[in-house]
Image: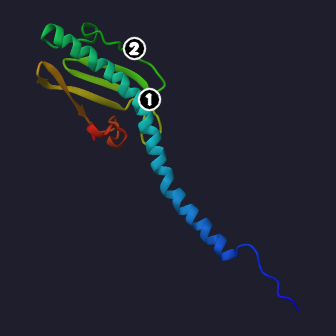
Amino acid sequence: MKKQNQKGFTLIELMIVIAIVGILAAVALPAYQDYTIRAKMAEALATIGEAKTSVSEYFIARGVMPTTSAQAGIRTNVDTTIVNSMTYANGLITLSIKAIGGDTADGDTFQLSLAGTRGGTPQWNCIVGSGASAIDAKYLPANCR
């Protein structure tokens, strides 16, 4: 009698593969969600960068900081898929975002404050707030964490 060769995988081998895939998915999904939220924050950071440039140009041209959004030439009626609003007052730019996933909520804020000047150019600091309305630092760019 001729012995037949088995082909295919055993049940144990299949279960091991499924367990490994499950573990990898459990690790990868939260990291991917954080990555997508940071990617969405790029739009918000571009918006606040626009305001930072306007304030810096005003300061370089006049030698003093603007006191209001209108004086700095900042558009405050920003309403995009990510950004709710932006305000400026006396060297502090505040950006309010919409809920974009993770533990972000509608109205969470991110701020840039004037830290002084270097070589006649304004220098800015990120303010990672605390409390209910602050954006979690893990969603901000590396220089703000």
Residue at left 17%, top 13%?
A: 59
Residue 11 seen in the current view: yes
Q: Does label 2 or label 1 sit earlier along the sequence? A: 2
| Residue nearest the viewer, comparing 59 with 67 | 59
Dot 1: few (<14), some (14–19), or many (≥20) neighbours within 10 Å?
some
Residue under label 2, please give it: 77
The local crowd at label 2, few if under 14, some if 14 to 19, many if 20 or more residues have their Cα within 10 Å, is: few
Report how far apart the C-alphas of labels 2 and 1 lie in the structure.
14 Å
The amino acid on which the numbered mark 1 sits, given as a three-letter code, is Lys
The residue under the point 28% across, 8% down is 70
Query: Up-down: is 45 above or below 89?
Result: below
User: Which structural element holds mark 1?
Assistant: loop
Q: Which mark is residue 124?
A: none
Q: How is the image coloured?
A: rainbow
Number of marks drawn: 2
Residue 101 lies left or right of residue 134; in this view the side is right
Confirm whether residue 130 shows in the render: no
The percent position of residue 141, horizontal first and vertical second, equals: 33, 37
Residue that lies at the very extreme toward the bottom in this rendered image: 1
Residue at 46% in and 21% down: 80
Q: Residue furthest front?
A: 2
Query: Which residue is disc 1 drawn over?
Result: 98
- Asked where in the image residue 113 lies, by quadrant, the reply is top left
Residue 20 x, y percent position in the rendering:
56, 66
> Residue 27 vs residue 54: left or right?
right
Task: Say which amino acid is labelled 2.
Answer: Asn
Tell me: residue 72, above or below residue 9.
above
